[in-house]
């Protein structure tokens, strides 16, 4: 029996990534080995309830959307997450995985769209970046830099070049809400002509929370 510890399953608009605005079912797994300073889902560090994979799938089916986001916490901290995503894919769902980039992504099914953070210095967890994960990124995937200040921005620009990220996949620059002014970040991207997608957390604009509901 395959069990996962789940913090919540909910239905909302996707607030980030290249499917922003699409009605999506979110499966938030419990637990994370990182403690980013700006984390807005610390409630998912512990607790939750154990659910069988078929039970999880039955719950998301009620929302009648083909878009599923598996998030956390850090979903890959639970090995059965891989089986969950395969079963969702086999049912025809579009599955995106939001991952911190601190755990090996090589076992993830190639049909999953990986949305992988590269932790910036202000997160307090940049030492946890597992850079070998970059080798497993494909054009459909996305790398996200969450930027809190000028140091993060310059650091992220260096990473773009050092790892030739724009040639591998889409690159997202996102401001830390309440810390990095979004307009200033947008202006920098335009000024430096960076080949990245600016994104802002839509759900926080609409509903001012991490769930977006």
Image (tube, rainbow, N blue to C red):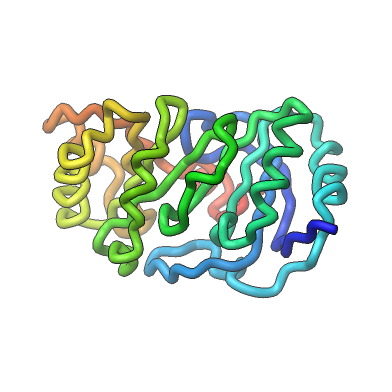
Q: Residue at x 24, y 42 (%)?
A: 185
In the picture, measured across the screen, residue 154 lies left or right of residue 78, that is left
Compare residues 171 and 54 and report the one nearer the observer.
54
Q: Residue at x 16, y 41 (%)?
A: 162
Quadrant of the rendered image containing residue 178: bottom left
Q: Can see residue 165?
A: yes
Compare residues 132 and 127 and report the one nearer the observer.
132
In the picture, measured across the screen, residue 174 lies left or right of residue 25, that is left
Residue 7, x across and y down, in percent: 70, 62
Compare residues 126 and 154 and report the one nearer the observer.
126
Q: How many marks?
A: 0
In the picture, measured across the screen, residue 30 lies left or right of residue 106, that is right
Specify the farthest residue to the front: 107
Residue 195, x across and y down, in percent: 24, 27
Q: Residue at x 43, y 71 (%)?
A: 35
Quadrant of the rendered image containing residue 73: bottom right
Residue 12, x across and y down, in percent: 67, 41
Quadrant of the rendered image containing residue 124: bottom left
- In the rendered image, the quadrant that contains the N terminus is bottom right
In the picture, measured across the screen, residue 201 lies left or right of residue 95, that is left
In the image, residue 130 sits, relative to residue 166, either above or below, namely below
Q: Can see residue 184?
A: no
Compare residues 208 and 87 and report the one nearer the observer.
87
Q: Residue at x 42, y 29 (%)?
A: 138
């Amino acid at each position: 029996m395959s069990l996962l510890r789940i913090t919540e399953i909910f239905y909302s608009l996707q607030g980030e990534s290249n499917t922003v605005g699409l009605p999506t079912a979110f499966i938030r797994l419990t637990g994370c080995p990182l403690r980013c300073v700006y984390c807005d889902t610390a409630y998912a560090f512990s607790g939750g309830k154990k659910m069988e994979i078929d039970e999880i799938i039955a719950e998301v089916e009620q929302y009648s959307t083909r878009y599923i986001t598996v998030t956390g916490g850090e979903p890959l901290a639970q090995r059965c997450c891989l089986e969950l995503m395969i079963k969702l894919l086999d049912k025809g769902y579009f599955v995106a995985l939001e991952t911190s980039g601190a755990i090996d992504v090589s076992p993830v099914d190639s049909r999953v769209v990986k949305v992988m953070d590269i932790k910036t210095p202000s997160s307090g967890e940049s030492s946890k970046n597992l850079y070998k994960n970059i080798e497993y990124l494909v054009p459909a995937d996305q790398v996200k830099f969450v930027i809190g200040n000028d140091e993060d921005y310059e650091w992220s620009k260096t990473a773009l070049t050092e790892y030739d990220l724009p040639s591998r996949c889409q690159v997202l620059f996102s401001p830390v809400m309440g810390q990095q002014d979004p307009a200033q970040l947008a202006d920098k991207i335009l000024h430096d002509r960076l080949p990245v997608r600016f994104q802002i957390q839509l759900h926080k604009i609409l509903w001012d929370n991490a769930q977006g509901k």
